Image: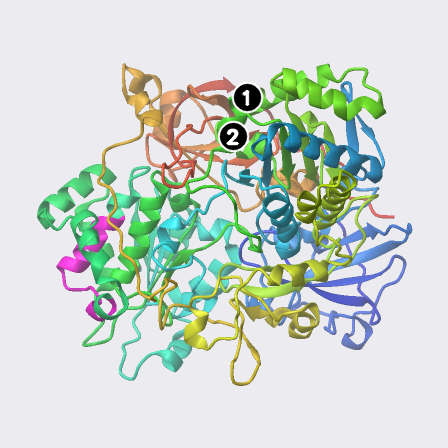
Amino acid sequence: MSLYPRRESLPIPPKDAKVQNTVCQYCTVGCGYVVYTWPVGRSGGPRPEENAFGVDLTGPQPTLTGLSYTESMHSVIQQANGQYLNVAIVPAADSPINPRRDHSSRGGANALTTYASFRPTRERLKMPLLRVGNALVPISWDEAIAVLAGVIKGVSDRFGPDALCARATDHGGGGGGFENNYAIGKLFFTGLGMKNVSIHNRPAYNSEVWGSRDRGVHELHYTAEDARLCDTLVLWGANSYETASVFYTEHMLPNFRGATQEEKKKVFATGEPIEPSRMIVVDPRKTASVTIPQSIDSERVLHLRPNLGTDVVLANAVARIIWERGYADRSMIEQRSDPSTFADYQAKSLAMGTTLERVLTEAEQVTGVPRVDIEKAAEWMARPKSGTHRRRTLVIYEKGMIWNYRNYDTIAALVQMAVLGGNIGREGTGCGRQGGHQEGYVRPAYPGTRPPPNVDKLLIEGQGKFYWVIGTNPYLTTPRAQQFRERIHQRTSTLTRALAGAAPAERIEKLLSALSSSSGLFMVVSDLYLTETARDAHLVLPAAGWGEMNLTSINCNSRLLRLYERFMDPPGQARPDWEILAQTARSLEAAYQKEGKVEQAQRFSGFTWKTEEEVFLAGAREFPDNVVDETGAESLPCETYKGVDYALLRSLGQRGIQTPVRKDPLTGTLVGTTRRYGRRFGTEDGRFKWYGTDPWRGYPPEVSKYFQGGKEAQYPFWLTTGRNQHIWQTGYHDQHIAQKMATVPLPYVELHPEDATRLGVKTGELVEVFNEEGSSTFQVRVTDAPKPGLIFAIQYHPRGTANHLTSPYTDAKTTIPWYKGTRVAVRKASNAPGPIAPTSPLEANDYP
C-alpha cells in the first residue's frame, strides 16, 4: 500500500494545447521547463503527431534522455473564470542548464504547487485580512491599502523613517524576480528612506559576499560549462548534490567521470594535458556530494572536515602553501592585482613573518584537518600541470561559507586563495557562489550604513513601530527564532489589545496613539499562505506566486536571464508584490499631495506601472550605461540587463541571455557575458584588491560561553545545519504536498552511531535539542555522516526550525549571522512516533 494514492495514467496534452516556457521556481540551478495547458476532459494521443509533446508515447522513453512526464508533473488548475485546465510542467528538451531533460525532486513537483480549490493548495491566501480582536477578517483591497498607507504615513510622520522596519525577499525564482524586487526597493529606499530593512534570510540589509566584492570579484562570474572543464572542482561549504542537484549531476559529475574530454580539447591550450579530474569537498559532514564521486574513484576525491567556524584558517593555510611551493600565478599578481595591498595580505593572511612549519601546525590544531591533507589540497588546486600550463580549478562555495563564523574574512580568504593560484577568468576556473535560490536584484541604492543595523535586535529591544514582512517567514528563518517569535508576538499582541473596539473611521488614529504610548508593533505580512509569522500580523496581504505573473530572474551558475511566463490566474484576489507596493505608493503620493507637501509626494512618483514588463524596464534604468566592449563589461553590475525586453526573452526561450548584458558599441547588438574577469577585475582601476584577514583568536563570546564554567560538559555537542533535497526552504509549498511530507515528515537531526549509543536513542525516535538560546524537537537519523560530537539538523521544516538554537553572534564587518555553528545538548523525548503515514495526514490530490 502506498503512502498516498497513485495514478495509473495521465492525460496527454493535445496538439493544440497552449505551450509556454518557464523556469523552475525552486533552487539556484534554474532548470528549464515547458508548461502545457488544455481543458479538462480532452486528451491527446500517444503518437507524435497526436500530442503537443511531439513525442512517441506508444512505448518506453529512451533511458535518461527521454521525455519525463510523471504524476507530480501533472495537475488541474482553476482559473478565475471557474474553468478547469489540465497543466503539465515537464523538463525542457532545449535547456542548457538541464540537458537530457534532467530534473530534481523539487522541480519535478512544480505542478503540484499550483492552486486549486479541491486540492491542499486551497490553503492559499485569497483576499486581504485585517485583525479585529483575535480574528483575521476579510476586507477589500481598497480598505487594505488605505490601512497600510495610513499606518505607514502616520508612523513616518510622527516617529520618523527609522520607525519603519521590513524584512523582504530580494531573490529571483518563485514569487521574486526583478519585477517584485525593484518595486520593493523603490518604495522602501526612494519613497520612504528606510534603513531598518533586512533581507529574507538574515537580520540586516547586507551582502553575504562583501569579502569577495571588495576584492573586485562578484560572486556570480563563472558558468556551468566551467564545472565541465575544470581539472579540480572544489565544493567548499556547498552540498551540491542536495541543494543544486542538476548542476551536480549534469555538469560536475560528467567531468569527474571523464565524459567531457572532447569539450576540454576544444578550449585547452595546445599541448595542455587533459588529466582525470579531481574533486575536493570541504564539509564537516560526509554527504552524498562526497560519497558519489568516492564510489567512482576514491583516489581522486579529497574530503576535508574542518572544525566548525575555522574555514578562514584553513583557506589561508592552503594559500600559504600555494605561495611557499611556488604554485602562485606571479603574472596574475604582478600584472592584474594591486601591489599596494599585497604586502598586507602577505603579512596577515599568509603570515609570512611566521615559518610555514608553525603555520601548518597551528592550522592543523585549529581546524582539525591533517597537515598532509592541507598540503594535498594546495597541490590539487594550484600545482601547475606541466611547464607553463596552469591547473584549472573551480571553487564553488555556499551557505557553509557565507553563513560561517567571520563571514567577511572567510569569504575574502577563499577568493584570495583562488586568485593567488591564478584560478579566475579562464575556462574551467573561478571562485564563486553556488547560490541558494535564483537571483533578480535591481533596486535603488540602500540609504543605510555599512555594516547595516541588525533589525531583529532593534525589534527585540522594542524599537520600530511598523514591520512589513514580504515573502519570508522569520519565525522559522531568523537567528534565535524562538526569542524573536516570542518578542514579536508580545509586541503585536500589545497593540491588538490597545485597538480593541476601535471603529474603522478611528482605527488609524487610535493605532498611532497606541504606538506612541506602548511597546506595540504593527505587523503586515504579504505571502502565499498564512504562515506562522502571518498569524501574528494585523494585516495580511495575499500575494501571487510563480506561474501567476510574468517574472524574470537569472540562475546562479550561468547568470542566465529568462522569462518565466504566466500560465494561470492567482487565487481569489491575490496580487503580485509589485502591484501591492505600487498601489501603496500611489496612496501615499495622493495623501501628501492632499496636504500640499509636494516634495514628500514626489518621492512616491513613478509607480504608474500597468504590467510586469513596465516594472522590468523601469528597473533597467537603475543600471549604468552598458554600451561598452568586452573589457568594459567587466565593471558592469552583475545583473545588468538594460536593453532587454520581454519580446527578446520570448524569442530566446530557454537559451536566455547571460548577464551582465552589454550593447556592442560598434553593432548595437545586445551581447551576453559567458564568464568574467579574464581581462580586468570589477574595481575602479581594474586590479584585484588584496586584504589581510584578522588572526584567529578563538570563538566569539556568544559561543565560547559554552566552554566556560563547566558548560562544555553540559552542552557537549557542536550543531551545524543545512538543507534536505526534498523540502525547499521552510516548506511553504511542500507542506501541502503529501509526497514531500511523507518523505520528510518531521524535522530531523543526524547523530553519529557512537553518540546515539551514548544517548540511548535510535533512528525514528524523538529528541529535544536545546541550549541557552532555545530548544527544538527533532526525529533522529543515526548515520556516520557527522563526526562524533557533531550533530546535523535540517535548518527549516514546516514543523520546526533549528534556528531556535542559533547564537546571537553576527560578524562585526557585515552583520551576517553564524547560522552554521553553536553548542547544544540533547535528551531523548520519546520513542519513535510510529509509521510515517500518520505523520503526513494530507488528503490526496484529487482531480475533477
Q: Position of residue 743 (x, y in %)?
A: 60, 40
Residue occupying the point 91% across, 51% down: 81
| Residue 284, horizontal then vertical, whole percent | 34, 41
Name which residue lies at 36% across and 72% down.
Answer: 678
Q: Secondary structure at mark 1?
A: loop
The N terminus lies in quadrant: top right
Task: Quickly name the residue at label 2.
Answer: 456
Determine crowd level at label 1: few under 14, some 14-19, many 20+ residues with C-alpha closer than 10 A.
some
Q: Is residue 103 visible?
A: yes
Q: Give the magenta range.
A: 315-332
Q: Residue 230: percent from the left, percent from the top? A: 36, 67
Q: Which residue type carries mark 1?
A: Gly
Residue at 55% across, 21% down:
462
Compared across the picture, whether 821 is left or right of 391 comes to: right
Q: How is the image coloured?
A: rainbow
Q: In front: 152, or 239?
A: 152
Q: How many marks?
A: 2
Disc 2 residue type (three-letter): Asp
Up the image or down, 152 lies above or below 590; here it is: above
Element under disc 2? helix
Report the predominant secondary structure element of the magenta stretch.
helix
User: Tags 1 and 2 in contact by the CB under 8 Å rule?
Assistant: no
Front position in the image: 134 or 341: 341
Residue 20, picture quadrant: bottom right
Which of pointers 1 and 2 lies earlier in the amino acid sequence? 2
- Circle 1 sits on which residue? 462
Find residue 241 and report its horizontal and vertical position in percent: 47, 52
Q: Nearer the viewer, residue 719 or 290?
A: 719
Q: CA distance from mark 1 to mark 2?
A: 10 Å
Q: 572 or 846, which is in the foreground? A: 572
